[in-house]
Image: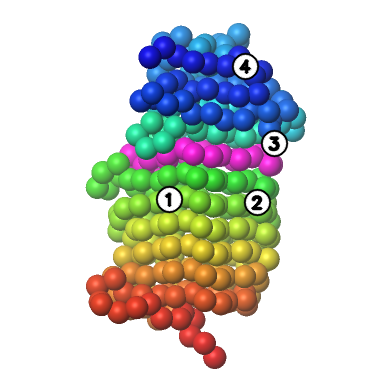
Amino acid sequence: MAKTRASARSPLFYSKQLGGFASIVDASMFPGNIFYVDSGDGDASDTAGFGQNPDAPFATIDFAVGQCTANQGDVIFVLPGHAETISAAAGIALDVAGITIIGIGDGANTPTVTFDTIISADMDVDAANITVENIHFIANFADITAAIDVNATDFTLRRCRFSELATDMNALIWVQDAAAAGSDRITIEDCQGIGLLDAANTHFVNFAGTGTGHRVRRNVITGDFGTMCIGGAGVITFCEISDNYIMNEASDNDSCINVAATATGVIVNNLCGGAAAQANGIATGDCLAAENYYGVHTEDLSAILDPVAT
């Protein structure tokens, strides 16, 4: 079937036809420039004059970011099947404030960003108010230090997927906040990290700084995180960690959700578990805690309240 496309400024964007169906995104939500990225298009080029039409897209997300204007609502549509590799520190630099990056496609057609070659390969978030949606992030090198390094406020990851390509191809930390309060209000929601089982992994999300207003909600994460899946030593404040499903194969105590003893916020409605019982699989600090459960998947038993009711 032939391509069906809208013009760059149409209120509707139509993706390449996939199995007889077209993905549709309401581009009228974005008042700024609209750019397109598609590594699989033979006409793609990181060159001026490209990127504003889905039939002549840019080849990389990083180049598209550099064409955006700060804080005017620019959006980058990453087209189905796009594949991009990060082989250096800041291989993708999200350094233009107020932009949105949206992957188009589902399943095997979801756009991918693969980290390889060096442990410092990462995507840096260096400007405020950036959103990334529906990208599949893949680890393809041993012990990548921190795949997504957040150094600015109001960063959102939504409906993204995280995976390890093979044994010993892993990210020690998938999302790392900044020191002190340099990355307030990180939001990670509706994401999926499945089979992140390398024993060297330490965190899915590491809150080492003292940020405020972080939200981690409605995520499904299974893996082996030797320190903790969600949390960190930083005294975060006014956080929301809610409605997550976490299975952590590590046997360490407090290794599903663990925030600092004086952290504040709400930690509610999380279902956690692992291969063995833990002493407090969920450690909630000074946060309001309610309806959090921890279970052991090797036993025919229901999960129990954790922390225990007092």
Residue at the spot of label 3: 98
Q: Residue at x 49, y 68 (%)?
A: 270
Q: Is residue 118 left or right of residue 289?
A: left
Which of pointers 1 and 2 indicates the residue nearer the eye?
A: 1
Which of pointers 3 and 4 indicates the residue nearer the eye?
A: 4
State the separation of the CA atoms marked 3 and 4.
Answer: 20 Å
Q: Secondary structure at mark 4?
A: loop
Q: Position of residue 214 (x, y in %)?
A: 63, 58
Which of pointers 1 and 3 indicates the residue nearer the eye?
A: 1
N-terminal label among 1 and 3: 3
Q: Is residue 166 left or right of residue 223?
A: left
Residue at the spot of label 2: 183
Q: Position of residue 242 (x, y in %)?
A: 55, 64
At label 2, the amino acid type is: Ser
At label 3, the amino acid type is: Gly
Q: Secondary structure at mark 2?
A: loop
State the separation of the CA atoms marked 1 and 3.
Answer: 24 Å
N-terminal label among 1 and 2: 2
Quadrant of the rendered image containing residue 65: top right
Vertical comparison of 27 with 235: above or below: above
Query: Do the CB atoms of the residues marked 1 and 2 lie less than 8 Å apart?
Result: no
Which of pointers 4 and 2 indicates the residue nearer the eye?
A: 4
At label 1, the amino acid type is: Gln
Quadrant of the rendered image containing residue 165: top left
Residue at the spot of label 4: 8
Residue at the spot of label 1: 192
State the separation of the CA atoms marked 2 and 3.
Answer: 15 Å
Vertical comparison of 154 with 293: above or below: above
State the separation of the CA atoms marked 1 and 4.
Answer: 31 Å
